[in-house]
Amino acid sequence: MNTYNHNFSEFVLDLPREVDREVAGDIEKESVFVSPFIERIHVSEDGKTARVVVRPGADLDETKEKTERFLAVMVRQITGFEIKVFVETKRKDTGPYQIGVNDELVKRGWMHDYGKGQVAYSGPVLKLAKLINDKAGELYKDAFAAKESHFPAMIDADTLHKCGYFDSHPNAVTFVGNVIEDFDAIEEFRRANSCSEGALMPQQDHIHIDGMCLNPAACFPCYPTLTGQSFDEGQCFTWLGRVFRYESRNINGLDRLYEFNVRELVFVGDEDYVRSVRAKALPVVEQLAAFMDIDCQVQTATDPFFATVSAAKKFWQASQEVKNEIKIPALGNDGSVKQLACGSINLHGNFFGKRFGFTCKNGEPAQTGCVGLGIERWVLAAFTQHGFDESRWPEAVRNIIFA
């Protein structure tokens, strides 16, 4: 039976099988990509049913059928893998976690939230973001002799295809478009906006997508530059990358952004070299967390893949233990503790070596791995754990960001 509330309708579906909170969380997060008419899907506490909140104008039969197909593939996920913790730091600051950090940063004028997953920041927030980036780069240089690099924010769709992104995360891609090279179409767009109160978009058939995308993963632009190279010894590269992932209605302050910054480390070589760098990256992350004086763990994890491939790809990642995630506690809007995924340490095998044609000294495709640190999430976690009392911050950080 449908119930109505503020022009929204709801229906409840039995899940094909009972799910745990991990799968329930994935269902709720990914529900924004099921239908433009679905506001959200909520899984019951017992993991047996799903309440679907539907926007006005929806065909309820069609929406229900699409939701059932989504739920059918999502519940196939296998969970219960042992979570291994490789790094754990405990802060010395004994003060309470700070609630409402995003709102307080805006109130103090240190951050402006545009409301679409983009933020501007200044003052202590900007200084802290720069410090985290610079400190990580310094640690990478000292530990791995990492070569400082720079890559563009846009990436060719063919490169993303080679990287397998369209198969794994098609919902997160942002394509770059422009008005077609047509005098009348451009003039029509100009005239429409010359006297309008708000921006008017070009007609859909006047927008040309030429195969460029906003980069959704900091490491991807590096691999085409390695084509044809042979790595007798391993090599590390590091840079600050601008990353874009479409999050629909999941955006929320610094917690989850559409556009954000990542301090990236990519390592290339044979299997022994790549695995040794990943092992050495663990104490580097520990050093950074200790420098910031924050609670932090590095543990096994999986990526949030698109629904139809989620079960298989998550199972492979978990069983092979190729992804370690940097988890830093923060607070939700209701004051509950949540674990922010503030970065990851990944092994790729020879996937990119094969796809982009670079080798190690024996002529075999080289292996790669990467470490990505989400700068804005580290900022959020640090303000959550130290608050706005300057005396609670570690001296080395305080003297820089509050100067």
Image (cartoon, rainbow, N blue to C red):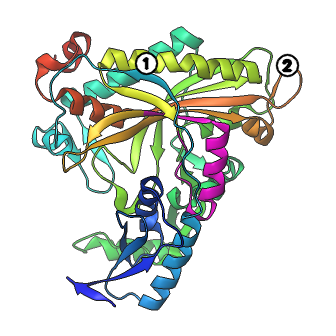
Q: Position of residue 273 (x, y in %)?
A: 71, 18
Mark before the other along the chain sequence, 1 or 2 = 1
Of residues 117 and 311, the one nearer the viewer is 311
Q: Is residue 119 visible?
A: yes
Left or right of residue 226: residue 322? left
Label 1 crowd (10 A; few <14 / some 14-19 / many >=20): many
What distance separates the C-alpha of mark 1 from that of mark 2?
A: 32 Å
Q: Is residue 186 above or below residue 356?
A: below
Q: Quadrant of residue 302?
A: top right
- For label 2, the residue is 361
Number of numbered discs present? 2
In front: label 1 or label 2: 1
Residue sitting at x 46%, y 90%: 61
Residue 167 within the magenta-colored segment of the rendering? no
Q: Is residue 374 above or below residue 13?
A: above
- For label 1, the residue is 286
Label 2 crowd (10 A; few <14 / some 14-19 / many >=20): some
Residue sitting at x 21%, y 72%: 197
Q: Position of residue 263 (x, y in %)?
A: 46, 29
Left or right of residue 201: residue 104? left
Q: Quadrant of the N terminus?
A: bottom left
* Circle number at residue 22: none
Of residues 118 and 29, the one nearer the viewer is 29
Q: Which residues are magenta?
A: 301-326
Residue 315 within the magenta-colored segment of the rendering? yes
Amino acid type, residue under disc 2 in the picture: Lys
Of residues 353 and 52, the one nearer the viewer is 52
Residue sitting at x 62%, y 19%: 277
